[in-house]
Amino acid sequence: MAENEKYHLSPERQLTDAEKKLIWKKPTTHQVSEEERRISNEIKRNWNRGEMKIANILLEGDAGSGKTQLAKALSANFGLPYTKVTCFADMDKSDIIGAILPVISSERLEKMDPAEQTVWKALYESDGFQSISEILLDALGISQEQAALKMKQLLKRAAENTDGEAIEYRFYPSEIVRAYQKGYLLEIQEPNVIRDAAVLLALNSALELDGSINLPTEIIRRHPDFIAVITTNRSYAGTRPLNEALRDRVQHTEKMDLPTKEIMIERVMAKTGFQDGKMLGILADMIMVLDRTARANAIKGVAGMRSFFYWADAIAGGASAKESLYHKVIYKITTDSEEIKLLEEALKNHGLFASLEEAEIELKKNENLTTP
Ligand SMILES: Nc1ncnc2c1ncn2[C@@H]1O[C@H](COP(=O)(O)OP(=O)(O)O)[C@@H](O)[C@H]1O
Ligand SMILES: [Mg+2]
């Protein structure tokens, strides 16, 4: 068996071409982490062990620690299509299970404004493979939250303008239902923000191992290959913690922290091509000090891997290290002057501004040596 297939869970399974396209392909910059190895082994080991099967995973931790990429890497390892749902505060039950939409006659369709026509046509032309919000996403180029809102407006208007006609209805499953029924790996991003208890309950019961979802049209059983990966940022003051019942459904959890300095530097080198280890070491130290200082002082923003990538890339492109520190890192954490002072103070106390200046002088010197 090929090395990249050693974790495949259902080697016999036939996927359609469209499904095969949903399996994530690891980019060359992807680095396998300890967490990825551990989860892959755990799931594979327990896959055929009945009640001991592990198919609900929680990745909780720092923003930028690699939760989403890990979920995608699992899709690649297991050979399962990857799909995701981004939760939002006002989610309601139709966002979990899907919605029933009327089939509108072509005469009435023609009287609608063009944008609305586009949406309805996209819906009717879909083969039931895509979920409703995904169709709206593609047809209108909007966010998932906007798509959900749009869908509700459409429904309301469609219900208002039936002109007493007898209309036919069609059920459009949600992304969650689609993954659940077809056996995909579903990343559920930030379900802790959901406010409605009934929605949490619906999500929770869907995550039962031998669960089922009651749709208006039929009862859907959980596909044996369905894997749910919940990803959420660790709760800090002011955020809502993950619902206890949902937490309880999870069979394996990883605490995702900002990676070690060495791994941070490796990821940045791989992604940006910038290879100055000394400079990158100082940038990593600064990111870590800023991250700690922000937490210790209850400053809301974060300094993490994403800031690190853009900062290193700016410096590689010739920007001043100190100036870009503000645009790529500090202002992303906060623009409050008092808070900025605290952050600067911390960097100064660690001697990091001085080291940064030194590394920059050296970088410029080396550039002058190598460019004729
Ligand atoms: N294993 C990895 N190897 C290389 N780069 C990674 C890895 N994991 C994450 N990254 C990079 O780090 C950044 C943040 O990762 P992401 O998964 O989006 O974090 P999170 O979902 O925790 O906020 C992305 O640019 C991603 O490509
Ligand atoms: Mg993420």
Image (cartoon, grey):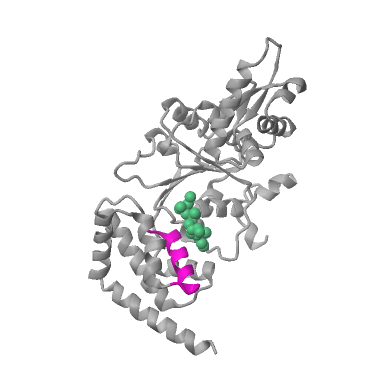
Q: Is residue 256 above or below residue 324?
A: above
> Which of these two is toward me, 69 or 204?
69
Q: Is residue 13 visible?
A: no
**Residue at 53% over, 46% down:** 46
Percent of width and height locating residue 93: 51, 26
Q: Is residue 209 left or right of residue 241?
A: right
Percent of width and height locating residue 190: 45, 42
Residue 162 in magenta stretch: no
Percent of width and height locating residue 239: 34, 41
**Residue at 40% over, 78% down:** 278
Q: Is residue 159 left or right of residue 54?
A: right
Q: Is residue 181 above or below residue 230?
A: above
**Residue at 45% over, 36% down:** 249
Percent of width and height locating residue 284: 38, 68
Q: Which residues are magenta?
A: 303-319
Q: Is residue 322 left or right of residue 269?
A: left
Please identify the quarter of the rendering in which residue 260 is found: bottom left
Please identify the quarter of the rendering in which residue 338 is found: bottom left
> Which of these two is toward me, 215 or 36?
215
Q: Is residue 301 visible?
A: yes
Q: Which corner quadrant holds the N terminus?
A: bottom right
Residue 317 in magenta stretch: yes
Q: Which corner quadrant holds the C terminus?
A: bottom right
Give the main secondary structure of the magenta stretch: helix
**Residue at 34% over, 77% down:** 357
Q: Is residue 362 left or right of residue 298?
A: right
